[in-house]
Image (cartoon, rainbow, N blue to C red):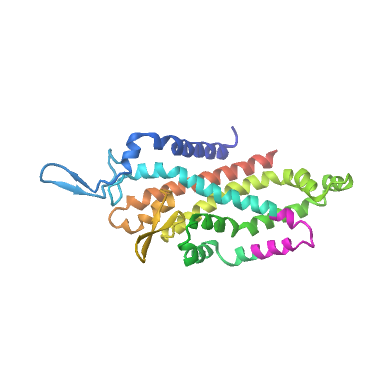
Amino acid sequence: MRNKILLFGTIMLAVIILISLVGPLFTNVQEGTEEQRMVFINSTTYERAPFPPSLQHPFGTDDDGRDILSLIIMGAKDTLLLIFSITVIRYLAAIVLAFLGSSKKSPFRLLIYGLNGFAASLPLIFAAILFITMPMFTFSPNRVIWIILFLSLTDVGKVAFIIQQSMSSLSHSQFVEAGVTVGNKPLGLFTRYYLPNLLPELIVQFFMDLGKVALLLGQLGILSIFVTQVFVQTNYGYGELQNTSLNWSTLLGMARSDILRGFWIPFFPALALTFLIFTFNFIGEGLRQHFSRV
């Protein structure tokens, strides 16, 4: 196979998916997520977590004595679901928005320009921090849904703008003009002529954006801003945000303060996220090369 980048990326993604589906079924992985802060060497000697990498714990343990490799395996599925959910919603919304804004007189065209300008002027990481930390969303029972929608739709203007510009270039092609001649309505033109020709570029950009979303979640994790948290009332007038997932950005954020006690605690979740980002970039670049030769 000539396209080695696509081959490597596909194998890497297949390994991650296999681990996310099969890994949590193993008993030792499930037991590895249980806390074990102290281990007795003999009747008078004991060691306290975190424990460094060893044969028993290849990636070491965290401050609670949980096996980091087991945590990464258990969080792989949630990580993939979170990243794919954000990106799929973004692209579905962008396709709909691009269609609605295909007419030069459509108000949705102005909306696309406005959203694209917003995305260009304010980095997504800052917009995410401003939104996620707002009290009305922090204490909302649907906090996770709101954050996923925000992270999806904040960058939707850029994707819709790219689609719109590609449609503008295709509008002067002979096959589109032929479609207009035979009486296709805007929806027919979009589904039969524009979208099939834009699909290769959209697929490439989709996988590239998967990597960008993974990077964004990692950045939020480093700042201890977690997506999968819910507010739980612990006493009258008191409450706290509790994590509901072991996704890799959450593991990275929770381990940030432990870097001086054990470098391996944040290192391996960061390594897992880096591996995932490279995976999506490899697939995206491999698909770009594949479609350019077709």
Which sits in the foreground, 239 or 104? 239
Where does the image place residue 159, in percent across and percent down from the top left?
65, 55
* In magenta stretch: residue 111: yes
Residue at image x 47%, y 35%? Answer: 18
Considering every residue shown, the one lying at the far top of the view is 1
Which of the image's four quarters has the N terminus? top right
Using residue 163 as the reference point, say whether residue 40 is left or right of it: left
Residue at the far front in the pictured view: 236
Could you tell me what secondary structure mostly forms the magenta stretch? helix
To which quarter of the image does residue 241 belong?
bottom left
Residue 11 image position (x, y, % from top left): 51, 36
Q: Residue at x 57, y 50 (%)?
A: 87
Query: How many marks overall?
Result: 0
**Residue 184 as seen in the image, left or right of residue 162:** right
Is residue 230 or residue 190 the one in the foreground?
A: 230
Q: Is 291 positioned to the left or the right of 10 in the image?
A: right
**Bounds of the magenta span?**
97-116
Q: Position of residue 114 (x, y in %)?
A: 67, 65
Magenta-colored stretch includes residue 138: no
Residue 175, picture quadrant: top right
- Residue 121 visible within the image: yes
Q: Residue at x 44, y 60 (%)?
A: 225
Q: Is residue 165 visible in this depiction of the protein?
A: no
- The outermost residue toward the left is 44
- Quadrant where the C terminus lies? top right
**Residue 117 in the image: x percent, y percent?**
64, 65
Q: Is residue 140 left or right of residue 286?
A: left
